[in-house]
Image: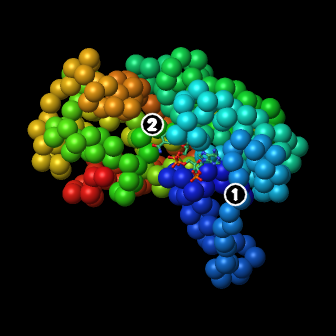
Amino acid sequence: MLVAGGSGFAGSAVVSQLLGAGFARSDTSAGQPVALDAGVVEGSLADLDVVQRAAAASDGVPHLAFRHRELAALAADTDHQVVEALGDALAGTGRPLVVTSGTLVFSLGRIGRETDKAVPDPPAAPRVASEKAVWRGIRVAVVRLAPIVHDAARRAFAGTIAERRCVSGHLGAGSQRRPAVHRQDAAMLYWLALEQVPEGSVLCGVGEGGIPPLALAARIGELCDVPVRAVAIEQAKAHFGWLAGLVATDAPASSAMTRRLLGGEPSHRELIDDLAYFVGKFS
Ligand SMILES: NC(=O)c1ccc[n+]([C@@H]2O[C@H](COP(=O)([O-])OP(=O)(O)OC[C@H]3O[C@@H](n4cnc5c(N)ncnc54)[C@H](OP(=O)(O)O)[C@@H]3O)[C@@H](O)[C@H]2O)c1
């Protein structure tokens, strides 16, 4: 299996999930653990030949690589090209390709679902082209991840901001709902998508459908021992920095169809519980 982006925050959890699953599911080992190992393919996403060769030599590809340090439009364009290249490499092989998208491809302000069409407006735009590029008759699935993927060790950006600003802020009245998923639940979803979902499935990687910002701000305030305050819309950029766009977005999502299809529920900690592990560790 080629985990594209396997060194990343979510991708490394997928690598662990696949290695663990290989231990558990081997049917050639007579119940004995089989030593599985992960190798590394070095190369840039810009080098589509390398991407294609690695994909062609694999049993399938969960694709989680993304150039987050680039401008969004450039990163999205690269992602689109990479998805096309992976699709070409796997076409006709019957091997799976799982492409990462996000729940922000939904229309905002209402609960997004698996069957919703991606809409071509920001902040959805970056993933729409990649979603379109995958529908070409190979064994593909799209995972629309919640915009907050978390675990107890990383990614409490809101906490970092609260400490820096000495206040835990919510935008305006705090009505913008945001979905979240634990990194391990997301990894499990990729594994199931590789193994068992019907061709052409769209899955939602959502553990919590819409976390209320007021509850989140209150918990962060408590953990960081800072006051909780409303931040005016005009101050959003100054307070939240690059997170301002996300914080302003009311984008709840449901994963009910995904849960029914896979016959399981997310089982790891919710975001607010994960935050407790951050006391004194925001960085
Ligand atoms: N984390 C979240 O909260 C979240 C939420 C929603 C959606 N997502 C999506 O889920 C996917 C995985 O996210 P993540 O948090 O795991 O991202 P991440 O930690 O930033 O990892 C990105 C991965 O892409 C690789 N990559 C980046 N630029 C590359 C390039 N030019 N050439 C080759 N490899 C390159 C990185 O490799 P290096 O380690 O070598 O740089 C890394 O393995 C992404 O599509 C992301 O947009 C994430």
> Height in image: 282 above or below 169?
below
- Helix, strand or loop for disc 2: loop
| Mark 2 Cβ inside 8 Å of ligand 1 | yes
**Residue shown at 50%/52% (left/top)?**
9
Residue matched to label 2: 147
**Residue shown at 22%/56% (left/top)?**
279
Picture disc at residue 42: 1
What amino acid is found at the position of numbered circle 2 in the picture?
A: Pro
- Helix, strand or loop for disc 1: loop
Whole-percent x and y of residue 83? 72, 37
Q: Is residue 110 left or right of residue 136?
A: left
N-terminal of the pair, mark 1 or mark 2, is 1
**Residue shown at 62%/67% (left/top)?**
19
Whole-percent x and y of residue 68? 53, 40
What amino acid is found at the position of numbered circle 1 in the picture?
A: Glu
Residue 177 can be seen in this image: no
